[in-house]
Amino acid sequence: MDLTEPSLELVDNERNNIDEQTDHQNAATGNTDRSGHGAIGGDADQAMDPARTNLQTKKDLSPVLRFYEGDNIQGRTLEEILEWSDSKLEYTHDFIQILFPIPERSNFTLHPAATLDERTMEAFRNKPELQASMRRALARMLRFFGFDYQIVNLDPDADGAATIQRLVHIVPNAETFPRAARNWMNSHNDLRITRIIRCLRCCGMETEAREFYRALKHLHTSRTGHPRRISDRTFMYWTRAAKRDLRIPPDMSDAEAERFGAT
């Protein structure tokens, strides 16, 4: 089960697109003999070759971290995806999992790379440069959804330079939102939004997740100013993604979540 799916109707929609996805191979890993025996050159050669050591260290990173550090993963780089047209973002179905990974593996991707483990989440929470890259990915998807946004600088240092940034003040763009909303509301993009909110929170970007959810809540409660109505069921999943204990995935029922120890 995709742990971000809002409805059976949306699942059927997504399953119709599964034949467009490709079966990717796992990212290559190093072949180092950890014991120091049997490997040509042994640890001594690695110690004498910093480039080789750095390469091995990078291979030890999760595919998600390598992707956000600029590597080509699953045939794409972050920079390439950020340059895609809205049409390509709409009709390509196997990029969102690496752009906004979550701890749960999706039924709609055959590659296990697009998941968040504890080590990867910790890296995002502690490295502003990784969050800055994900913030760019969020900004691109917000434009796709028809939203405007602002990036504010927080906690300037002694020289006035920003040490922390946050993407906030997410609001519909009066010109682009109506057309964009006709495309994404009540479609497989509902699944994407659930995933994005959960990913942001897992990666320590609570401010962005909260602001995105606030903008979506306004759309849901106002029920005016946009061409389609956001269903209560869809909004329930967005709410779960935004507010639940991160140990509890959005598709877990409230009864199950209560037995797990949190809602």
Image (cartoon, rainbow, N blue to C red):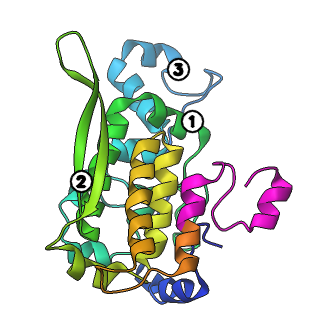
> Which residue is the extreme one toward the top?
158
Task: Answer whether residue 262 is magenta in the image.
Answer: yes
Quadrant of the frame with the N terminus: bottom right
Q: Say whether disc 2 or disc 3 marks the residue closer to the N-terminus.
A: 3
At 81% from the left edge and 64% from the top edge, which residue is drawn? 256
How far, Cα to Cα, is label 1 from label 2? 30 Å
Residues at discs 1 and 2 in contact (Cβ within 8 Å): no
- Counting from the top left corner in percent of width and height, residue 177 is at 23, 74
Residues at discs 2 and 3 in contact (Cβ within 8 Å): no
| In this view, the mark in front (1 or 2) | 2
**Which disc, if any, is residue 119?**
1
- Counting from the top left corner in percent of width and height, residue 5 is at 57, 74
At 45% from the left edge and 36% from the top edge, which residue is drawn? 124
How far, Cα to Cα, is label 3 from label 1? 27 Å
| In this view, the mark in front (3 or 1) | 1
Q: Residues within 10 Å of mark 1 (few under 14, many from 20)?
A: few
Secondary structure state at the residue bearing disc 2: strand
Residue situated in front as seen by the camera: 77 or 156: 156
**Which disc, if any, is residue 42?**
3
Q: Say whether disc 1 or disc 2 marks the residue closer to the N-terminus.
A: 1
The answer to whether 222 is drawn above or below residue 13 in the figure is above
Residue that badge 2 annotates = 149
Left or right of residue 58: residue 153: left
At 49% from the left edge and 52% from the top edge, which residue is drawn? 199
Q: Quadrant of residue 181?
A: bottom left
Range of the magenta residues? 238-263
- Counting from the top left corner in percent of width and height, residue 163 is at 28, 23
Q: Residues within 10 Å of mark 2 (few under 14, many from 20)?
A: some
